[in-house]
Image (cartoon, rainbow, N blue to C red):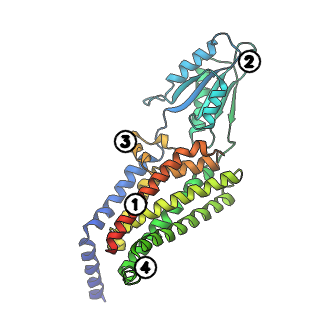
Amino acid sequence: MIRGALAIFRRDMKKFISNPFVMFITLAMPIMYLIIFGNAIGGTITGIPLGVVQEEPYTSPTPLYEAGLDALTGFHQPGNPALFAVTVYSDENIAREALATGRLMGYVVFPSDLVPGRPVRLYVDSSEYTIPALIQSGVAAVLVQVQAENPLFVNNIYGTVEYLQFFGVGVIVMAIFMTTMMGGGIALIRDRELGITEGYLVTPVKRSSIILGTIGSGTVRAFLAGFLIFAVNIIIAGVLVKGAASFALVLLVLLMTSIGVTSLVVALSSRFSNQQEYASTIAFFNLLLFMTSGAFYPVIGIPGWLSWITVINPEYYAVHALRSIILRGQGINVIGTDLIALAIFSLGAIALGIMTYRRTLE
């Protein structure tokens, strides 16, 4: 009994040692979790875009406005950069539009001198996590610092957004990636190991048809997974989609993300000969992309040396687009950049998938 167990032990250890790639990924993953997860989640949030407005009518800026503007510009926690990136607006309507389109995360309106005791008004994008509380506490601390006696009126423009709703949008994107990368990719490698892929080549079916059919089936699976989690998110988290146009935009984002991810999986899976190496690589990609997508924590809190990944991360654009539609009720004018980025990613991934999978077939 012991001899048989030792024989199996030696066989499995030799198999593990003979694959240095899997050994490296196995040892590197905990380090990557420490570096990426530790820095992407719970980082120090600074540079929050905040607008400042002097309430009309006024002939000249009030002492409260001038003191508040100066204090907000320099407000910071010890050892950290300024909490706010302050922009001065001459008109409240302009500041309101900037907040509605995502260029600001809040704006402060200082009252005029015509009626004493009027409140300082603070309007906050309440769809983000942690940031609304930071803005409110920072503005309140500034009012104490300048010895203002005016009360602070806070307006969360999107109501109360729970963390479950904030995170739930990110889970929709994760479902698409996990379904395609773990399910579709491993299935492709298994088909190649069983000779099913080679069997396609003896049929009249064209190689391009094989590739497009593979990408198409993977896209449908990913889209259905994303839509299912979206429906579950409505039930559990209580999010609502406002109108048919917003619902159509959600479906468009899910479809574009599914196409791009499926094509990327086809490209990646064609470069691996066994499931173990593929699964190890995908685990690394999932960590890198999901942790820097803003699904867990606002991307503004990610340190600069890691934030560049968000620029090339399709998950970031998908999460931002879905959050803008579902939580903020925004439209194509706000998510246009996200759709362009997803389109570029999808087209590039399709081209890469076709090129690499064609090599596998040949």
Amino acid type for the residue under numbered disc 1: Ala
Amino acid type indicated by mark 2 = Gly
Quadrant containing the N terminus is bottom left
- The residues tagged by marks 4 and 1 sit, at their Cα atoms, a distance apart of 20 Å
Secondary structure beneath disc 3? Answer: helix
Indicate which disc residue 205 carries. Answer: 4
Q: CA distance from mark 2 to mark 4?
A: 79 Å
Q: Residues within 10 Å of mark 1 (few under 14, many from 20)?
A: some
| Residue wearing tag 1 | 351
Q: Is residue 14 left or right of residue 99?
A: left
Residue 117 is tagged as 2
Callout 1: SS: helix
Disc with the residue nearer the chain's start (4 vs 1): 4
Q: Position of residue 128 (x, y in %)?
A: 58, 43
Identify which residue, 47 or 104, lies in the foreground. 104
* Residue in the foreground of this view, choosing between 12 and 330: 330
